[in-house]
Amino acid sequence: MPFSCIIFNDDLLAAEQLVEYLGALPLLNLVKTFSSPVKAMEELHHLIANNQLSNPGLERPSILVKLSGKNRAVKLYIDDIILIEGASNYIKIHTKDKLYVPYNKMSAMENELRNYNNFKRISRSFIISSLYIEKVDGYHIKLKNELAVSVSKLYRPAFDSFLMELLNSRP
């Protein structure tokens, strides 16, 4: 079974030589060559999210969320999470397919997602995923699945930086 391969290299001559070398290896399938790491990561995310790139040795990043009741938990894939909504002593996790309501704190979820750059806390009550932003109008955000949220005043400076970074990383 061939493995999929993607090249990241801003040295075009080195990239061409690597393409030639990979062409001689029957177990490697070159998917694409990139000179920009940002574009490469965007393309990788798109390919994996749409199941166009298999990853036999790697599993999609996920978190295990404890549900109410004894010994109940669910594995949620990071790239399926659209929005996390805080509500007193529990949270609502909106995913592409389902709504989960575990007993948890927003601060705990924020901490759990801290290594994933696509998540941003925009108020005391909301953490959003940039992967599902459909529209930003000032500080009003429309997400997929007809979800709409607003950025609170306290979180606006951080959101401004987050949005600028998103816009600058797009081709």
Image: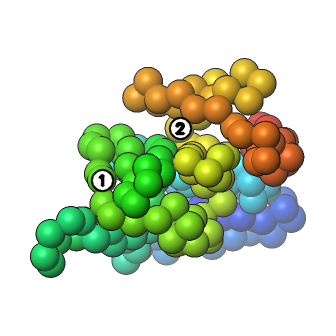
Dot 1 falls on a residue whose secondary structure is loop
Q: Quadrant of the C terminus?
A: top right
Q: Quadrant of the N terminus?
A: bottom left
**Residue 153, image x and y in percent?**
79, 40
Dot 2 falls on a residue whose secondary structure is helix
Give the number of the disc on residue 132: 2
Q: Residue at x 40, y 29 (%)?
A: 145
Q: Nearer the viewer, residue 11 or 86?
A: 86
- Residue at the far left in the pictured view: 70
Task: Indicate whether 28 appears above or below 32.
Answer: below
- Of circles 1 and 2, which is in front? 1
Q: Residue at x 53, y 38 (%)?
A: 132
**Residue 20, image x and y in percent?**
65, 66
Q: Residues within 10 Å of mark 2 (few under 14, many from 20)?
A: some
Locate residue 153 relative to residue 127 in the image: left or right. right
Q: Residue at x 65, y 47 (%)?
A: 123
Q: Nearer the viewer, residue 50 or 165?
A: 165
Question: Can residue 60 be seen by looking at this rendering?
Answer: no
Task: Indicate whether 129 appears above or below 25.
Answer: above
Give the number of the disc on residue 123: none
Residue that badge 1 annotates: 101
Please, what is the three-letter code of the amino acid marked with disc 1?
Answer: Val
**Earlier residue among tags 1 and 2:** 1
Task: Indicate whether 40 appears above or below 148.
Answer: below
Locate residue 137 relative to residue 66 in the image: left or right. right
Q: Toward which corner of the image does residue 13 lie, by quadrant?
A: bottom right
